[in-house]
Image (tube, rainbow, N blue to C red):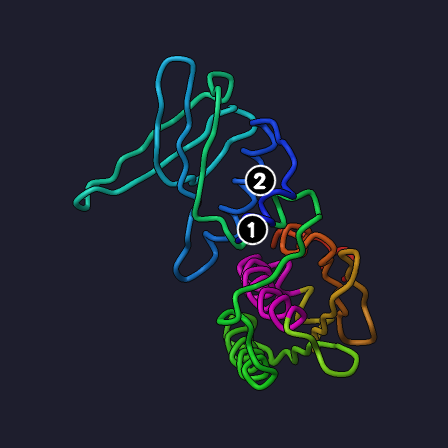
């Protein structure tokens, strides 16, 4: 991120910042090597530093963690006591902090090729077959040649599908209803989250209007799918 880009950022209150940090943490915790935001929180009488791990909106408490010589350190901070927040390690999440003025640009290393997507889809099909005791065909629907951003988003949909179908497989009634009605799962990228039955398959549309932030949670996607069964 360059200096000119930083000049486009709006002023946010601490509650907005905490919610955005939670969004970032939710995305990163699903990665093989999560890069959680490094945070320093100043309260009215002290300060605390560590990696932002979680925020409980009901309890109004932020959890920071760190490890020194394999010794874990946990800090729980009441939101009402926070006077300021500084953080780093979030360069690729400028789009969340910029109120839509800065477009989301994934790291080139995170963009799969179409061939890699096909391999990942095949691997997921095998995992799903084992979990559901049934062959399920999975496909990414797109027009023309997918852009790099589309391929990135599609790779994240595969992770979402893996988690969602795993939840369905672990619920006996949901598994029975799903395997009786579904043989194919197709997904496309769009501006809303929907699930539509199509003969013996389900067609999913995943909302990318706000990047990964607009993706449904696995439990939400599960509910969307099960409503049509």
**Percent position of residue 109, x then y:** 48, 71
Question: Which circle, 1 or 2, is nearer the viewer?
Answer: 1
User: Which residue occupies 46% across, 16% down?
Assistant: 81
Q: Is residue 163 magenta?
A: yes
Q: Secondary structure at mark 1?
A: helix
Q: Is residue 222 visible?
A: no
Disc marking residue 20: 2
Q: Residue furthest top?
A: 45
The reply, left or right, for residue 74 in relation to residue 185 is: left
Q: Are marks 1 and 2 in contact (CB under 8 Å)?
A: yes
Disc marking residue 81: none
Q: CA distance from mark 1 to mark 2?
A: 9 Å
Q: Secondary structure at mark 2?
A: helix
Crowding near the residue tagged with mark 2, few <14, some 14–19, many ≥20 C-alpha atoms within 10 Å: some
User: Which residue occupies 47% across, 20% down?
Assistant: 82
Chief SS of the magenta region: helix
The one nearer the camera, 36 or 95, is: 95
The one nearer the camera, 4 or 203, is: 4
Q: Residue furthest front?
A: 4
Which span is picked out in magenta? Answer: 149-176
Q: Looking at the picture, does residue 81 appear above or below residue 90?
A: above
Tag 2 or tag 1, which sits nearer the N-term? 2
User: Mark 1 — residue?
Assistant: 93
User: Which residue occupies 27% across, 35% down?
Assistant: 73
The one nearer the camera, 105 or 150, is: 105
The reply, left or right, for residue 39 in relation to residue 128 is: left
**Percent position of residue 57, x then y:** 56, 29
Q: Quadrant of the C terminus?
A: bottom right
């Amino acid at each position: 991120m360059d200096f000119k880009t930083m000049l486009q950022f709006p002023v946010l209150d601490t509650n907005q910042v905490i919610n955005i940090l939670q969004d970032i943490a939710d995305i990163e915790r699903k990665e093989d090597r999560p890069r959680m935001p490094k945070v320093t929180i100043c309260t009215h009488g002290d300060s605390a530093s560590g990696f932002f791990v979680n925020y409980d909106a009901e309890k109004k408490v932020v959890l920071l963690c760190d490890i020194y010589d394999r010794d874990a350190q946990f800090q729980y901070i009441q939101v009402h006591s926070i006077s300021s927040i500084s953080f780093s390690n979030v360069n690729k999440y400028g789009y969340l902090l910029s109120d839509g003025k800065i477009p989301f640009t994934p790291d080139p290393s995170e963009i799969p090729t179409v061939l890699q997507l096909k391999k990942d889809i095949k691997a997921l099909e095998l995992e799903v077959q084992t979990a559901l005791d049934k062959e399920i065909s999975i496909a990414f629907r797109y027009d023309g040649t997918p852009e790099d951003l589309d391929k990135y988003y599609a790779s994240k949909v595969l992770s979402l599908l893996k988690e969602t179908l795993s939840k369905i497989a672990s619920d006996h009634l949901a598994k029975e209803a799903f395997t009786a009605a579904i043989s194919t799962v197709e997904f496309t990228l769009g501006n809303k989250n929907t699930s539509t039955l199509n003969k013996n398959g389900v067609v999913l549309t995943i909302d990318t209007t706000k990047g990964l932030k607009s993706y449904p949670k696995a439990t939400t996607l599960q509910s969307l799918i099960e409503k049509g069964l």
